[in-house]
């Protein structure tokens, strides 16, 4: 009997299901956010939470357990060096599921499955722009107007929109070439 052995099976055999869950857990740790179905996200959530909890303990036994699940030394190192310290102050709730729309083909519920604490990405500003901005600031402080070149750099450029001439398509010589264009509509493309 299967009393109290509820598990999301994902309509797969046991080995295939385990491989799917481990693959989703690996992708979550690598990308920190992914778009998947609700059932898959619910199935992988316990494993992902367990891996982050292991990363918080940062012991040799925990690293071996994580390697047994993930099977990649680089991924284990990233888990324990980057992801684990981020969640040091958090007791639980390492992942979140954000609902999206339904998938068009099979009406499955799509979600964003992500880690709650994500790496902050800092955008680098180009050095040339920084230098021009500093020169303009110095000129304003000194009481003189910025040079003409600096004024041009401050104003956004207006680009002229050029319309392309319509290109005529050559008829395809493939079988059913004309019929295919009848059934292909813009609304069918995603």
Image (cartoon, rainbow, N blue to C red):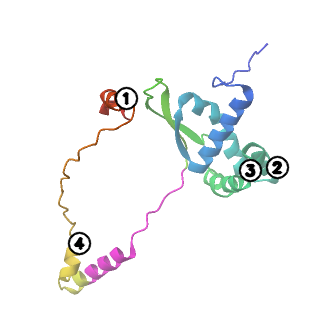
Magenta segment: 118-138
- Residue, x 23% and y 87% (percent of image)? 142
Residue 12 in view of the camera: yes
What residue did someone put label 3 on? Answer: 57
What residue did someone put label 2 on? Answer: 61
Q: Nearer the viewer, mark 3 or mark 4?
A: 4
Magenta residue check for 131:
yes
Q: Are marks 2 and 1 in contact (CB under 8 Å)?
A: no
Of the residues under marks 1 and 4, which one precedes in the sequence?
4
Of the residues under marks 1 and 3, which one precedes in the sequence?
3
What residue did someone put label 4 on? Answer: 154
Total residue callouts = 4
Mark 1, Cα crowd under 10 Å, few <14 / some 14-19 / many 20+, is few
Of the residues under marks 4 and 2, which one precedes in the sequence?
2
Vertical comparison of 101 with 95: above or below: above
Q: Which mark is residue 176?
A: 1
| Secondary element at image label 1 | loop
Tell me where residue 152 sits by quadrant: bottom left
């Amino acid at each position: 009997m299967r009393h109290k052995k509820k598990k999301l099976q994902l309509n797969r055999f046991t080995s295939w299901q385990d491989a799917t869950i481990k693959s989703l857990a690996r992708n979550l740790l690598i990308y920190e956010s992914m778009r998947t179905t609700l059932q898959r996200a619910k199935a992988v959530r316990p494993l992902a939470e367990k891996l982050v909890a292991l990363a918080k303990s940062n012991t040799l036994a925990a690293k071996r357990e994580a390697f047994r699940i993930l099977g990649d030394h680089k991924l284990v190192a990233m888990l324990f060096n980057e992801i684990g310290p981020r969640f040091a102050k958090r007791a639980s709730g390492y992942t979140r599921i954000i609902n999206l729309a339904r998938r068009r083909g099979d009406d499955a519920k799509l979600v964003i499955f992500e880690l709650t604490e994500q790496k902050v990405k800092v955008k680098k500003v180009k050095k040339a722009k920084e230098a021009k901005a500093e020169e303009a600031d110095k000129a304003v402080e000194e009481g003189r107007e910025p040079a003409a070149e600096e004024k041009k750099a401050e104003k956004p450029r207006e680009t002229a929109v050029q319309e392309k001439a319509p290109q005529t398509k050559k008829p395809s010589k493939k079988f059913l070439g004309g019929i295919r264009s009848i059934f292909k509509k813009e609304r069918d493309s995603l």
